[in-house]
Image: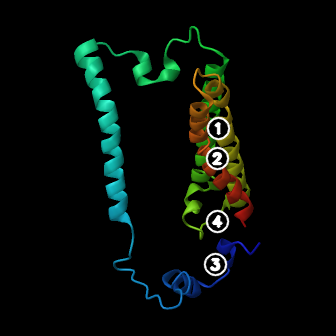
Amino acid sequence: MGQDPSKVLLSLSPTEQEAFLNGPGMKPPPNVVPDFENPRNLTHAAYVILIVCIALVAVVVAPVIYTKVVHVRKLQWEDVDSSVCSTRGQNAFYWTCLVVGWLNWLGNMTMMLLVAFGCTPTAKSWNMLLEGTCIAEFPLAYAGAILNLVFDTFTLILPQRVIWSLQLNWRKRLGISLFFALGLLYAKASSTAAPLLP
């Protein structure tokens, strides 16, 4: 592993620091001319995808809200959040899913807070010239990848028993199981990410 860039930068004179900070981050690839005024990006595509996703959610949610408000005239807790509805009659599968979901949320919130407030002072996160210390980023990245892998695997395995106990023929159960197994792709990405970290 190389030297800490902040320590290298702090060892330079003020003139050298200014020249370094005002210079390019690295040389551009061959046959590439940098355009810092109007860089090429996918902002427009991101806006289109965001609008389409919001529209799809609206198409699915709007009829439910309309039916509940206009016809049923009653909103129930499970319409807002299934985790706060009545727990009477819930089985072990329900409670396991609830615990895994909350642990996943807590784990990811902890990771986000460690990333956001991992430096003392906090401003050192974006200003390496400040004196201070930061949490080692690579162990944190490994921990995040492992945490995601564990919870992705749980999410994949949990519904399998329920799926295979459905009153359907084996082909339909296999199809549903394979649909849930698409999560393996994400779990594979999480497991692959950790060894690729420096």
Q: Do the residues bearing badges 2 and 3 touch, measured as CB atoms within 8 Å?
A: no
Position in image of residue 109 (x %, y %): 58, 41
Quadrant of the frame with the C terminus: bottom right
Single out the mark in the foreground, 2 or 3: 2
Q: Amino acid at mark 4?
A: Glu
Say whether residue 113 is visible: no
Left of 127 or right of it: where is 7? right
Q: Amino acid at mark 3?
A: Leu
Label 2 SS? helix
- Which residue corresponds to mark 2? 184
- Which residue corresponds to mark 3? 9
Left of 140 or right of it: where is 124? left
Q: Do the residues bearing badges 2 and 1 touch, measured as CB atoms within 8 Å?
A: yes
Earlier-in-chain disc, 4 versus 1: 4
Q: Amino acid at mark 1?
A: Leu
Q: Residues within 10 Å of mark 1 (few under 14, many from 20)?
A: some
Earlier-in-chain disc, 2 versus 4: 4
Name, please, the residue furthest toward the right. Answer: 1
Label ID, residue 169: none
Label 3 SS? helix
Say whether residue 86 is visible: yes
Single out the mark in the foreground, 4 or 1: 1
Name, please, the residue furthest toward the bottom. Answer: 31
Q: How many marks?
A: 4
Q: Residue at x 33, y 44 (%)?
A: 54
Q: Residue at x 31, y 13 (%)?
A: 74
Single out the mark in the foreground, 2 or 4: 2
